[in-house]
Image: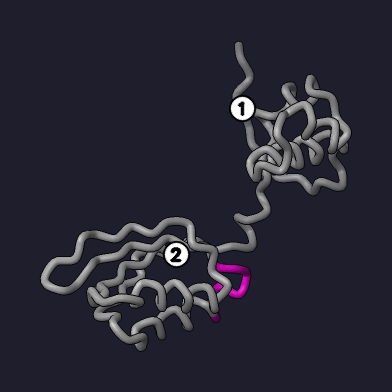
Amino acid sequence: MEKKSQLIVADSKILPEVFTKVLEVKKLMACKGEKSLASACKRVGISRSAYYKYKDFIFSYEELFTRKIVNIYLLLNDSPGVLSSVLAFLHSLNANILTVNQSIPVDGAAAVNISLRLTDESDKELTELHSVRELDGVLEVKILSAE
């Protein structure tokens, strides 16, 4: 009988160092910090075999506790710079923009859906997010979800 997989959360301080090094290699490869897996493993100080042994079982869980994903819908006036000013406003909130989907403007207005990640000051930032309505060219704002 095969044992069922179970996820646990543990402080990295109590885990073998190889686990955190596997995470470092995964991050280096995702961010194109190294050209090859071999060089990433060498840089971090683990063997490729150790990486392959654990890579499918080790994941970072940090952002789930300190970040909030928000999906917003905006109806914007079809004029130059409106979307840019919205994105600049979101940047001022230290939001990490995950996706931007804009439809083709119809009758002078375009629908835009934005997914973003806020920092651990999410309650304050969510309140400030509503003030995006005050920007020139923003016709409508709806927060669709906040996790």
Q: Hey, which residue is sitting farthest left in the picture? A: 107
Observer-nearest of 109 and 132: 109
Give residue 106's position: percent from left, percent from top: 13, 66
Q: Which mark is residue 133?
A: none
Please report the bounds of the magenta region as a residue range. Answer: 118-124
Instruction: Identify residue type, mark 2.
Output: Val
Horizontal side, residue 52 vs residue 126: left or right: right
Answer with left or right where residue 100 lies relative to residue 64: left
Dot 2, how many residues are within 10 Å of its Cα: few (below 14), some (14-19), or many (20+)?
many
Q: Position of residue 56 (x, y in %)?
A: 65, 28
Q: Are marks 1 and 2 in contact (CB under 8 Å)?
A: no
Circle 1 is placed at which residue position?
A: 5
Q: Position of residue 138 (x, y in %)?
A: 29, 80
- Label 2 residue SS: strand
Q: Which residue is mark 2?
A: 70
Looking at the image, which residue is at 36% across and 85% down? 135
Q: Is residue 81 above or below residue 41?
A: below
**Number of the front mark, 1 or 2:** 2
Q: Could you tell me which residue is drawn at 64 percent across and 37 percent down?
A: 7
Q: Considering the image in quadrants, where does the N terminus appear?
A: top right
> What is the distance, in whole Å, between disc 1 and disc 2 at their CAs?
30 Å
Name the image quarter holding residue 87: bottom left
Q: Of helix, strand and loop, which one carries label 1?
A: loop
Residue at x-position 60% and y-position 55%: 64
